[in-house]
Image: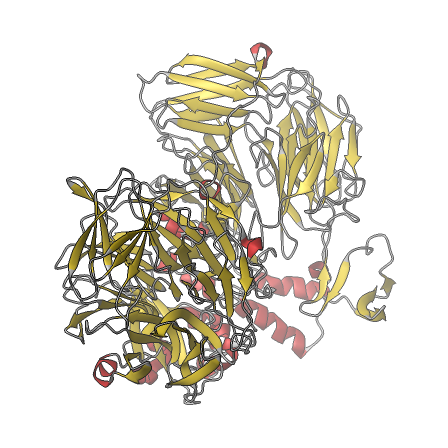
């Protein structure tokens, strides 16, 4: 099997001719792909077949793509040579049809066969060199491989149209896996540089279609290798793609990421940007994936090549092994700049340049092992497991080398001996080999399940090739858990047949034969009806958001503050008894008000003053009765973009007077959340205006305001407003009576601060945050509301935060920090995000030198090299400037529940699924009608600094409550809520009066989503008739009585969650007929009202009257 003069790359053993013996496939760069046939006696004969001639073949995968039983072959191609191998190449250009194209390279026309379809000219990146097309070979029998054309109809784009040209990509790895669970082998191709990863979904008969645009929101940039496993044992395969992000602070600070990220337009979530980090995709079970690598702790693993999911410790959960290292650290910024300087001094020959590249250091990094923690997270344990060999490790594969029933690991080390790692786990196991029908004698593509082992169900797939340059022994191993466990194996063969083997015992290797398999019966299970139906087309609303360059004013901002809206609210603006819908607008758009006809139809109102264009971004929207029958819409007006202290902080839309009122004066702080509450218990509402940010001064504390209503006008409450000066960056607010005294407390969600609680002492607000045990939970809080989640009659706090799936997650061993001040005295507030690095034992900057010099140019003079910067802490970086620096900390990024224990609050993180994306709106209601309060979260934020990945793993999340304070995430296919954009305000309302609570969710710069609840058990609708100054009874608390027990308390809010207002008509869950309804009115008076057995809607009056409406 000698391959003389062959630059061999990937290899795999596979029975290509179906004779039962493993043949050998060897890829090469420029020398084609060789096939060596096994005669069954250990002798191999090279086939005369020449595959992939003249191309830069890398990895390969083998599978039966068309279901004919024969093994087909996919080869990922890179290039035989690259422009980087021609450092002195001279390019000339010309313009064709208005576009600049490369005309000649070193005098040779680009029409030459080796230069055709090789280069494009990009305005962002200059000359882009393209890779080579991959190639799929279909096996027509024996080793008769026929290439499949990319443009012949076998490959379709996302819209189902045939490709018009092959993808010219930098292919590194390829794997056949059944990605969507239909039994057909799909294809995942890892592509380097700016080539997008290709995911081809098998349509049957060997046709492939590109995966839906929405299925993956982003990918790795330098994709090296891929592997699949069911990491959370939910029955769906997840997958990881490796990149080259280092776990070491110093390495990250000296590592160049040279390609700019193309920022998607506002409202665009179908593009798929690439980022230089590992990506881990959690399968949602409906053809879409949430990217969770940062949450999981697997986002960085050095310059990585091969990932392998393997249950190393045999506990029933797949762990992750990663090979890494590189002979030359070609991304070292200091060396790159040194080489540029050398070439600028004089013209160097190619040989001199190649010699100078030896200045790049060798990256001999330790291979990594990540133990599955059973909660979607992984812990690095390479040293404990003896896998931390430090070298340059590329290919990696699995085989049971010692026949003990577990899988050992072989690693290919560059310019060194191979590494062999024996698995020494002594836990009980079950090994499985397959004997398939010829010609697929190893059962490649079969799915194997083990039931009754260490966990209820484990599953794996038999693959061939698919590793980076490598291929496994065709054996799969499962964790038995106990030697006494009685287990069952099921196999779904590529042919569609199914085998079942019972009585499986531990510590044995089973060979399952396809010959006795039976044709599988069709799964007759029907999908359950989702709780909500998407009826957004009945609105046809899209939020208006103009682009604003936040980074021009404050270059060191981690994310934009200009794309924070819109808010949304339900309010009966026309007095017909049906709640209408109000949606805020960005600058340049108009406030949207939709009249509700009560039958599911909505009509936009365009009467004056609603047609007036918004001069600023609008934040919260609230309805307010200025006088009986006189409705005014309050819209927070943010001065963040114009930065002017003049102008209204709240725009008032007087619908009765058909006029705009901008008389409510603003200050330097930009408006954020609004909330109404009867602060003094006198029957009139006060208006809170939260200070979100001081324009150009983030994260300096902003000031908030409180206004009292006097004869239909708002007047500043100077005493309480004084207490709200410099209260912080307020993002969410709600008035809620936490102590049951009849007066509402003011609760604020603060960025770089805690959830602040101001106790209401007879109309005077006094902060009680520390006394209630909340002061330690500093975070980047977005929204806040209250609800009785544990049914004890006290209102708990639910607060939305940024979650754990951010670039900061791996740094949170200690609190995150931020330093700010005008360090270069140019009038701009500079910002230094920081964290404590355990290796350096100092607080270090989060961002690299090139990024930081955008805002602090003096750093380029202070640090001669990136390595010097990388070794420095914040104190060394700022020096004496630290004396004028302010500092804040964030201990908590999780979205949380704070259970009300009377004199303090008990903190509990929301479920892990709620931490996968930033959350904004928080809505509490009984969505399924079971009598327990549930929670809805709006999610996602894309407008981060261009160097950071967008936070896009959410799509709106329903959390089902059990009535004891526990919440469980409901999958989108069960809830029916699937919103992929940047969700912001959200509000609840039974808009059609069917006794089920419906949901509206806004998106920044995108369609507003309306969801009609069709599956909940209908509840009891309750309307309140309060006082003249508070006709809707805002602040009242409702509680149903069911004989000896009571349901949860529900409180009416005007402004809560994130910039939103729920309907004042409440829907209370009635799992059994209630006998009474208790209402504690805003003045503290409690009245108990009888509830008729047939009641479906009540009108309850503050004077004690009750009327049956339905």
Q: Residue at image x 22%, y 45%?
A: 1047
**Rendered location of residue 98, percent (x, y):** 82, 71
Where 1104 falls versus 625 (above or below)? above
Residue 886: quarter of image: bottom left
Q: Is residue 2 visible?
A: no
Where 518 falls versus 1034 (above or below)? above
In front of the other: 383 or 270:
270
Q: How is the image coloured?
A: secondary structure
Where 426 falls versus 628 (above or below)? above
**Rendered location of residue 606, percent (x, y):** 56, 71
Q: Residue furthest top?
A: 516
Q: Is residue 181 left or right of residue 623?
A: right
In front of the other: 116 or 383:
116
In front of the other: 496 or 623:
623
Residue 1079: quarter of image: bottom left
Q: Is residue 996 visible?
A: yes
**Rendered location of residue 975, percent (x, y):** 44, 43
Q: Residue furthest left?
A: 903
Residue 894: quarter of image: bottom left
**Rendered location of residue 191, percent (x, y):** 63, 49
What is the quadrant of the N terminus in the image? Answer: top right
Q: Is residue 380 left or right of residue 788?
A: right
Q: Residue at image x 55%, y 32%?
A: 181
Q: Residue at image x 41%, y 89%?
A: 825
The number of callouts visible is 0
Where 612 falls versus 755 (above or below)? below
In front of the other: 646 or 769:
646
């Amino acid at each position: 099997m000698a391959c003389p003069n062959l630059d061999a790359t990937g290899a795999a053993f596979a029975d290509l001719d179906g004779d039962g013996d493993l043949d050998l496939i060897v890829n090469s760069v420029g020398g084609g792909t060789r096939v060596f046939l096994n005669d069954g006696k250990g002798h191999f004969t090279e086939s005369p077949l020449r595959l992939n001639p003249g191309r830069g073949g890398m990895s390969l995968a083998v599978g039966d793509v068309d279901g004919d039983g024969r093994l087909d072959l996919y080869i990922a191609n890179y290039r035989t040579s690259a422009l980087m191998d021609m450092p002195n190449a001279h390019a000339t250009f010309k313009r064709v049809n208005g576009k600049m194209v490369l005309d000649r390279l070193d005098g040779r026309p680009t029409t030459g066969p080796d230069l055709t379809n090789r280069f494009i000219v990009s305005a962002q990146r200059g000359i882009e060199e393209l890779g080579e097309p991959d190639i799929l070979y279909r096996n027509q029998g024996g080793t008769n491989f026929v290439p499949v054309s990319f443009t012949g109809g076998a490959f379709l784009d996302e819209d189902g149209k045939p490709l018009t040209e092959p993808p010219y990509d930098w292919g590194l790895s390829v794997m056949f896996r059944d990605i969507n669970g239909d039994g057909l082998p799909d294809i995942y191709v890892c592509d380097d540089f700016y080539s997008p990863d290709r995911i081809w979904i098998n349509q049957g008969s060997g046709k492939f279609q590109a995966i839906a645009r929405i299925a993956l929101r982003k990918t790795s940039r330098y994709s090296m290798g891929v592997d699949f496993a069911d990491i959370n044992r939910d029955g769906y395969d997840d997958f990881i793609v490796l990149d080259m992000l280092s776990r070491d602070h110093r390495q990250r600070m000296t590592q160049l990421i040279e390609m700019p990220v193309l920022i998607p337009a506002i409202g665009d979530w179908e593009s798929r940007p690439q980022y230089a980090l590992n990506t881990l995709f959690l399968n949602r079970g409906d053809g879409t994936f949430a990217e969770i690598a940062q949450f999981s702790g697997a986002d960085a693993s050095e310059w990585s090549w091969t990932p392998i999911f393997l249950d190393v410790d045999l506990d029933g959960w797949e762990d992750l092994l990663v090979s890494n290292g590189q002979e030359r650290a070609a991304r070292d910024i200091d060396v790159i700049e040194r080489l540029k300087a050398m070439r600028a001094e004089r013209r160097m020959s190619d040989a001199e340049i190649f010699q100078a590249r030896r200045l790049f250091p060798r990256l001999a990094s330790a291979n990594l092992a990540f133990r599955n923690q059973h909660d979607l997270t992984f812990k690095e344990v390479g040293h404990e497991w003896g896998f931390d060999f430090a070298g340059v490790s590329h290919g990696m594969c699995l085989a049971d080398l010692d026949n003990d029933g577990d899988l050992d690991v072989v690693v290919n080390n560059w310019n060194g001996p191979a590494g062999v790692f024996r698995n020494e786990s002594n836990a009980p196991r079950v090994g499985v080999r397959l004997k398939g029908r010829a010609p697929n004698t190893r059962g490649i593509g079969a799915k194997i399940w083990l039931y009754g082992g260490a966990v209820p169900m484990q599953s794996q797939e038999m693959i061939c090739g698919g590793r980076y340059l490598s291929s496994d022994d065709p054996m799969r191993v499962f964790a038995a858990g106990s030697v006494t466990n009685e287990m069952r194996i099921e196999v779904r063969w590529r042919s569609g047949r199914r085998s079942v083997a019972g009585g499986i015992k531990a510590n044995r290797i089973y060979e399952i034969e396809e010959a006795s398999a039976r044709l599988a019966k069709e799964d007759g299970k029907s999908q359950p009806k989702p709780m909500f139906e998407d009826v957004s087309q009945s609105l046809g609303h899209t939020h208006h958001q103009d682009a604003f360059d936040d980074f021009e004013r404050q270059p060191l901002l981690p994310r934009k503050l200009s794309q924070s809206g819109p808010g949304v609210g339900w309010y009966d603006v026309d007095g017909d008894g049906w709640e209408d819908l109000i949606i805020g607008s960005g600058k340049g758009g108009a406030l949207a008000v939709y009249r509700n006809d009560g039958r599911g139809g909505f009509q936009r109102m365009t009467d004056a003053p609603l047609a007036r264009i918004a001069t600023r971004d609008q934040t919260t929207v609230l309805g307010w009765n200025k006088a009986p029958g006189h409705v005014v819409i309050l819209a927070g007006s943010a001065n963040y973009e114009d930065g002017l202290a003049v102008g209204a902080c709240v725009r008032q839309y007087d619908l009765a007077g058909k006029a705009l009122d901008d008389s409510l004066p603003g200050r330097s702080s930009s408006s954020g959340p609004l909330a109404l509450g009867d602060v003094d218990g006198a029957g009139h509402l006060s208006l809170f205006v939260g200070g979100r940010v001081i324009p150009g001064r983030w994260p300096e504390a902003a000031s908030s305001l409180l206004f009292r209503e006097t004869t239909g006008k708002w007047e500043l409450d100077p005493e309480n407003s004084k207490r709200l000066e410099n209260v912080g960056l307020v993002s969410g607010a709600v008035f809620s009576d936490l102590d049951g005294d009849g007066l509402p407390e003011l609760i604020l969600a603060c960025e770089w601060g805690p959830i602040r609680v101001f106790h209401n002492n007879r109309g005077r607000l006094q902060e009680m945050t520390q006394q209630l045990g909340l002061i330690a939970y500093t975070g980047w809080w977005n929204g806040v509301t209250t609800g009785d989640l544990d049914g004890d009659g006290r209102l708990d706090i639910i607060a939305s935060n940024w979650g754990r799936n951010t670039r900061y997650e791996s740094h949170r061993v200690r609190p995150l920090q931020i330093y700010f001040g005008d360090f270069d005295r140019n009038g701009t507030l500079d910002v230094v995000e920081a964290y404590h690095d355990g290796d350096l034992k100092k607080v270090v900057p989060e961002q690299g030198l090139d990024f930081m010099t955008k805002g602090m140019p003096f750093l380029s003079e202070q640090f001669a090299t990136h390595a010097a910067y990388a070794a420095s802490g914040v104190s060394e970086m700022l020096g004496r400037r630290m004396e004028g620096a302010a500092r804040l900390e964030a201990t908590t990024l999780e979205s949380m529940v704070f259970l009300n224990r009377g004199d303090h609050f008990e903190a509990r993180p929301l479920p892990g699924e709620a931490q996968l994306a930033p959350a904004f709106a928080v809505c509490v209601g009984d969505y399924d009608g079971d009598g327990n309060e549930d929670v809805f979260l709006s999610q996602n934020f894309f407008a981060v600094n261009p160097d950071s990945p967008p936070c896009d793993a959410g799509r709106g999340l329903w959390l089902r409550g059990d009535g004891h304070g526990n919440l469980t995430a409901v999958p989108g296919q069960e809830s029916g809520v699937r919103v992929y954009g940047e969700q912001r305000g959200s509000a609840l309302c039974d808009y059609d009066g069917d006794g089920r609570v419906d949901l509206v969710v806004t998106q920044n710069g995108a369609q507003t989503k309306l969801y009609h609840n069709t599956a909940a058990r209908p509840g009891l609708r309750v309307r309140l008739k309060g006082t003249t100054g508070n006709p809707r009874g805002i602040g009242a608390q409702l509680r149903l009585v069911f004989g000896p027990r009571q349901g949860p308390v529900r409180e009416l809010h005007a402004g809560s969650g994130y910039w939103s207002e729920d309907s004042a008509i409440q829907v209370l869950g009635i799992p059994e007929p209630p006998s009474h309804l208790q209402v504690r009115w805003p003045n503290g008076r409690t009245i108990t009202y009888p509830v008729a057995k047939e009641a479906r809607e009540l009108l309850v009056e503050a004077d004690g009257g009750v009327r049956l409406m339905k």
